[in-house]
Image (cartoon, helix red, strand yellow):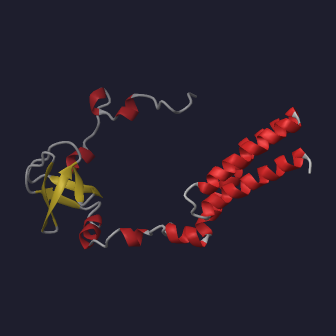
Amino acid sequence: MDIWLWALLLLLLGLILAVLEMFIPSGGILGFLAACSFIGSIVLGFRYSVTYGIVLLLVTLFGAPIVIAVGLSLWPRTPLGRRILLDVPTSEDVLPEDPLKKTLKGLVGQVGTAKTKMLPSGVIVINGRNIDAISEGAPIEPGEAVRVLEVRANRVVVRPLKAETQPVEPDDLLSRPVDTVLPEPFEPEA
C-alpha cells in the first residue's frame, strides 16, 4: 500500500474518532487517538510530498472543525444526548401563576390618587384598594391624581396626571425631553 493512501486512511480515521468522541463517553481517549491520527496523517502526507502534506494539513484544520460541528448538531438527537440534555422549559413551566401580578397588570392605564407622599415609593388608592407604588421620578403629594404606567416585578409605576397634561414651554430647554432638543445620533442627516 502506498504512503499517500495510509495518510488518507489516517485522516478519515481521525475524523471518525473525533465524531465518536462526542457520541461515546470515553474520557478523552477517542479524542486523543483522533489527534494522533491527524498528526500521523499529516506526517505521512509530508513524507509523500510537500503538496500532499499541505492539502492534508488544510483538510485537517478546516475539515475537522466542520465534522465536529455537524456531530455536535446531531448529538442532542442521539439516545445519550437526550439523556444528558434536558428539554427547554416553556414559560408555563418556569413562571408561576401569580394572581397578584395578573391583577396588578390589569391596573395599567387606570387613574387613582396618592394616599401618602411618594418619594419615590408610597401608597396609592385605585377603586378603594391600597396599592404599593413607585413614582416615575418626581415626588408626588398626597391626594394628587396619578396614572398607572406599568408593572415591574410586582411594583406599580405611576406618574402624576398634572405631568401628563402640563404644557412644555418651547423656550425652556431644560423642561423638554432630550430627544426633542438634540438630533438623533444614529439617523442619517437629510
Q: Residue furthest front?
A: 1
Question: Is residue 32 visible from the viewing direction of this image?
Answer: yes
Residue closer to the observer: 87 or 179 = 87
Residue 18 is situated, as x and y percent measured from the top left of the image, at 67, 55
Question: Is residue 59 visible from the viewing direction of this image?
Answer: no
Q: In this image, 1 relative to 112: left or right?
A: right
Query: Which residue is painted at 15% across and 59% down in the image?
Result: 132
Q: In this image, 5 relative to 13: left or right?
A: right
Query: Which residue is painted at 27% across and 58% down in the image?
Result: 153
Residue closer to the observer: 123 or 50 = 50
Query: Which residue is painted at 45% across and 29% down in the image?
Result: 183
Image quarter of residue 12: bottom right
Residue 143 is situated, as x and y percent measured from the top left of the image, at 9, 54
Whether residue 171 is situated above or below residue 149 in the rendered picture: above
Residue 3 is situated, as x and y percent measured from the top left of the image, at 88, 45
Q: In this image, 187 relative to 73: left or right?
A: left
